[in-house]
Image: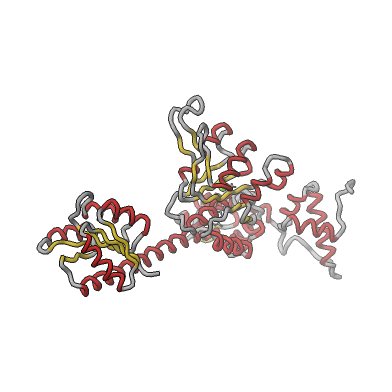
Amino acid sequence: MPPKILIIDDDSSLRRVLEYNLQQEGYEVFTAAEGEAGLKLFAEKAPALVITDLKMPGMGGFQLLAAIKERSPATVVIVLTAFGAIDTAVEAMKLGAFDYLTKPFNREELKLTVRKGLQLQGLSEENRLLKEELSGRAEFKSIVGTSRAMEGVFSVVRKVADTEATVLITGESGTGKELVARAIHSGSSRRGAPFIAVNCAAIPRDLLESELFGHVKGAFTGAIRDKEGKFQLAEGGTIFLDEVGDLPVELQPKLLRVLQERVVEQIGGTTGQKIDVRVVAATNADLEKWIAEGKFREDLYYRLCVIPIQLPPLRERPEDIALLVRYFCAKFGAEGVTFSRQALDRLQGYAWPGNVRELENTVERLLIMREGEQVGVEELPEKISAAAASPEGGVLRLPAGGYSLEQLEMEAVLEALTRCDWNQTQAARFLRIPRHTLIYRMEKYNIMQPGRK
Ligand SMILES: Nc1ncnc2c1ncn2[C@@H]1O[C@H](COP(=O)(O)OP(=O)(O)OP(=O)(O)O)[C@@H](O)[C@H]1O
Ligand SMILES: [Mg+2]
């Protein structure tokens, strides 16, 4: 695509000369006869370079220059001045103009100045993109993990971030759902616009509708003025609907309409408002079960779950723990502190029902309470050291004559289930395996709860 250039001058013959010369050079050229029209064209065409006269009726060149620089600092502006008015040109350059041309100018001078200006524009544009990319990466860096499961999450986030697709993030409490939502926002071209998080479970039911969609004055008692909802506040950016499963059934059709038509209806409003907002939602509820129970609309679920991202619980990725511990030490300003091998072993053996958040809090507490530069196993909270405590040499003594691994596995599954009162979720957690793996093992060994068919 050829670079776009906008020319603003009230002198029509000069406009035509400029336009002709620059078109000859292969640029795409737009012209306007005065400031307001020029600014409008500027907004429409987003030119890389603007050439403007300084003295024009109506909005003068200085005002125009300021307006352009405010909207788009990277745009290169070249000003035209009458011969002998160098001081006004200098003034313009102080305000951010790139260069000036004195009338009458020759063609070569015009071409050269424009070329230099576009070169600079290209550089600053590249710079901006680079900076944006880096800031996006920085956000990404705050999600720690090298396990296969987390690599899988990163790969989806990378692919989906800079699209408009609605994302549904699921995972237990403390697995990093909000972190991922933020990474998606900052990995998208919406990163300069707001990221608005709404916790649907934390806002009282009767306020939630107005919080999300806004209301007009007089819509209900107490609505003394118009109020924008979170959707309007997120314009151009991303809204993060946390605990979306807790959205009351009566509000679900409204959200569905937003997702389908990108239209929000304020309470008491007569018409819908068009909005441009990307939706990312999260839940730790089993929405498919809630659909079956009539608590969540199925059509809404499919609209939300265009791209599902499931965050694995921490107990399924103990290999991330050492790295997370290092990361949190640095986060709390204790880069120099280490954890003993034994202490790390125990942390890796614990089931972390509160996931990464629980680990983060634990590390923070340990760092405050620590005696020296190394945290030892004796400093760990009882529940962590006890959970993984094992006799010297492991939990087992195998018979001298050998033993079948399958038999061992079957016994382990059986023991876990009986200990957990046949609660499969708890037994799976106890064995540090996903529930579906447990169920598979139960079928494999034909293990059934006594008294159940
Ligand atoms: N992979 C990770 N790397 C670094 N920090 C993490 C990671 N996962 C979670 N955290 C940290 O753990 C805490 C909890 O994360 P977050 O709030 O994103 O979890 P959540 O899934 O939204 O939890 P909840 O369901 O309870 O709202 C945050 O302080 C977050 O920074
Ligand atoms: Mg959260």
Percent across and percent down for residue 307 are 61, 56
Colour scheme shown: secondary structure
Instruction: Name the residue at the top extreme.
Output: 221
Q: Is residue 207 left or right of residue 94?
A: right
Residue 332 in the image: x percent, y percent? 47, 54
Location of the N terminus by quadrant is bottom left
Percent position of residue 232, x then y? 47, 43
Work out which residue is located at the far front of the displayed protein and give it: 13
The residue that appears at 57% across and 57% down in the rendered structure is 376
In the depicted structure, whether residue 183 falls above or below residue 242:
below
Residue closer to the observer: 236 or 138:
236
85 and 423: which is toward the camera: 85
In the rendered image, is residue 339 in sight?
no
Q: Quadrant of residue 339?
A: bottom right
- Residue at the spot x=23%, y=50% of the render? 59
Q: Is residue 243 above or below residue 205?
A: below
Q: In the picture provided, is 409 more to the left or to the right than 41? A: right
Number of on-image labels:
0
Q: Give the image location of residue 116, x and y in percent.
A: 27, 71
Residue at the bottom extreme, as displayed:
108
* Image vertical order of residue 432 relative to residue 285, above or below: below
Residue at coordinates 81% horizontally, 59% vertically from top-left? Answer: 441
Residue 375 at least partly seen: yes
Residue at the image point whose x is 19% and y is 64% from the top: 100
Left of 17 or right of it: where is 270?
A: right
Kindly indicate the quadrant of the structure image that contains residue 257: top right
